[in-house]
Image: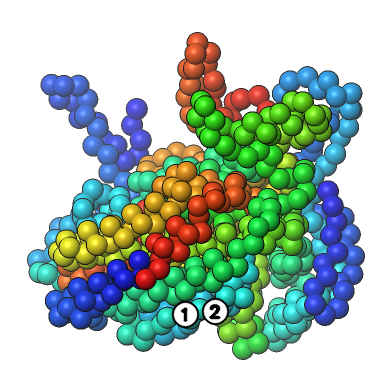
Amino acid sequence: MSDELNTNSGQVPAPRDETGEVIGVRKGMFGASSGGDTSGYGGLVRTVTLPGPTARPYGGWFDEVADELEGALEEQDLLPAEAIEKTVVDRGELTFHIAREHLVRVARTLRDDPALRFELCTGVSGVHFPGDVGRELHAVYHLRSLTHGRLIRLEVSAPDSDPHIPSLVAVYPTNDWHERETYDFFGLVFDGHPALTRIMMPDDWQGFPQRKDYPLGGIPVEYKGAQIPAPDQRRSYS
Amino acid sequence: MTTPHATPRATTEGTVYTVTGGDWDEVVESALKADDERIIVNMGPQHPSTHGVLRLILEIDGETVTEARCGIGYLHTGIEKNLEFRNWTQGTTFVTRMDYLTPFFNEAAYCLGVEKLLGIEDQIPDRATVLRVLLMELNRISSHLVCIATGGMELGATTIMIYGFRDRELVLDLFELITGLRMNHAFIRPGGLAQDLPRARSTSCASSSGP
Amino acid sequence: MKKNLPEYDKLATGNPIFKARMQDVGYLDLAGCVALGATGPVLRSAGLPHDLRKSDPYCGYETYEFDVPTADTCDSYGRFLIRLEEMRQSLRIIEQCLDRLEPGPVMVADKKIAWPAQLALGPDGLGNSLDHIRKIMGTSMEALIHHFKLVTEGFRVPAGQTYTAIESPKGELGAHVVSDGGTRPYRVHFRDPSFTNLQAMAAMCEGGQVADVIVAVASIDPVMGGVDR
């Protein structure tokens, strides 16, 4: 996996260290899980990691935002180191990983502080990383500042055993349906949501479809005498 | 098999299950208890005036709406989950079908995201970028035409529906000439476009949009 | 098309019945729009000229000349006028595009990512162009391998996540793409504008009349394919 140095306008940021979150392990040449590996490289084992935390300076306006946020949190007697678990700058985007207990306060600070003013939240996106034990379910919020023209990302994680995250509907009412959708598909329960019910699946559906352990579904297709199985059960070479 | 919200009932034709979902029970109960003339109207998923399969649950007091709720999910096809089992390029074909009136925008958002992850944003040829903008703007016109046309029809003016769709045909013909399809073209791919314009392109486009 | 657009003005814009049914219907002011995350014509009808093509340009939009129409009436009539005007601006952009077309490639040069084949109309229908087939079967082994691997397995994308937003006719369409370094997307989530704008329907309609609900929903212009995905 390549390790890019972000060359934003402004300072050149410090190189990143590789301790990102492990999201899986790939074995063999292509990482195929089924079928024999005839490439000769069958003994290769590689862990796949997401980009790890970035050290300061971040480059561009990221430093300004990070400083403002930390300052504003300190004013509220909230230690930035407790609330912000790590900061990742990757591909020109700034991501704050927030501890879930402090999510509402951090979001309110981001919305109200005049130098930050991230008024528009574009919704929650859930991601399920079964390989990242203890932090399997991630909820990703993207915040857009209309006054400053900026976009940042907040990422919160919750373990599978306790999939609760505080709801941001009180801060950003637009998250109402987005949180319902994330609950519907991932089982992430948003505490404090006014009406957390299923939105896309039928109301009495059991199971959470977009988790990685939920099958895709689909029936085999018969074609010229052969049966083609559903996409998640086909052979894959990667 | 009973689920929490399905109650079976034996009839001459076998067992009939009454399925209610969500908080419908509570809504009905509280409406029964209310003293004033409040009716709950379910503008159900199939209705010519709701833009597709949208269920509008309206509590009406006379002619005034006191509470409005949307029931959605009737068109959920699991595109996001399906994408996890396909190649990056095959993803375009799925993503195109999400917002079916604006397929180029869906594709463009997806491909711009993939290109950003790949880090090849600067290497996309200029011609590909200009053509993407051209196709997206044509699609914007066709989408707005549908909005105006169906909006007018919902108000009762059917003429505007014909006007809108007639003008949309001009745009769809252009799309057919360029991509081969009128709708859901998987044309914008990660890295550029699937194909170049056919030779007769520019003149045809100019005459369609021109005076 | 340019000569057809004034027909809408004649038929609808000045029409008193249109105006009576659409003015002051579906009211959602700026604070409501931003709180509920409504973007696109709904936000612009509240007066804020927020357009991602201008504020966060992509695909070279910063080099095109066009205006962002707004209205300050916050109602369905304003949204209708905005849409008409946006069509005219789109025509302007298209003309500028046509002037800029220069001959050149349309796929990225990196052969490890670029889609290999060109389609052409052959005797048995649309398929790979015969030139391409001649090249991969006859001359270049590498071209054959590239074609095969790219079509069956696909290219690999380095691990990470990104969010790209564009301005679709309905609003801000965002794609949150997460990759785990493989040939398949790990997770793709679309922030669809119709989904978010439809949430605003309840705020617009309560207190109004039943027929106004229809007008308000029509002015939001939800496309259920986007809402439900």
**B103 left or right of B34 in image:** right
Pinpoint residue B107: horizontal percent, then vertical percent. Answer: 54, 53
Discs 1 and 2 lie in a common subunit: yes
Taking the spot 49% from the left edge, 13% from the top edge, the residue there is A224
| Residue in the foreground of this view, choosing between A183 and C154 | C154
Residue A238: quarter of image = top right
Pinpoint residue C129: horizontal percent, then vertical percent. Answer: 62, 34
Query: Residue A94, relative to residue C157: is it above or below?
Result: below
Taking the spot 76% from the left edge, 50% from the top edge, the residue there is C109
| Label 2 element class | loop
Q: Is residue C160 visible?
A: no
> Where is mark 1, residue-wise?
C68
Residue under mark 1: which chain is it in?
C
Residue C206: quarter of image = bottom left
- Crowdedness of circle 2 by 10 Å Cα count: few (<14), some, many (20+)? few
Q: Outermost residue toward the top?
A: A225
Residue A29: quarter of image = top right
Is there a contact, CB below 8 Å, between mark 1 and mark 2?
no
Three-letter amino acid code of the residue under disc 2: Glu
> Where is mark 2, residue-wise?
C65
| Residue in the foreground of this view, choosing between A225 and C210 | A225
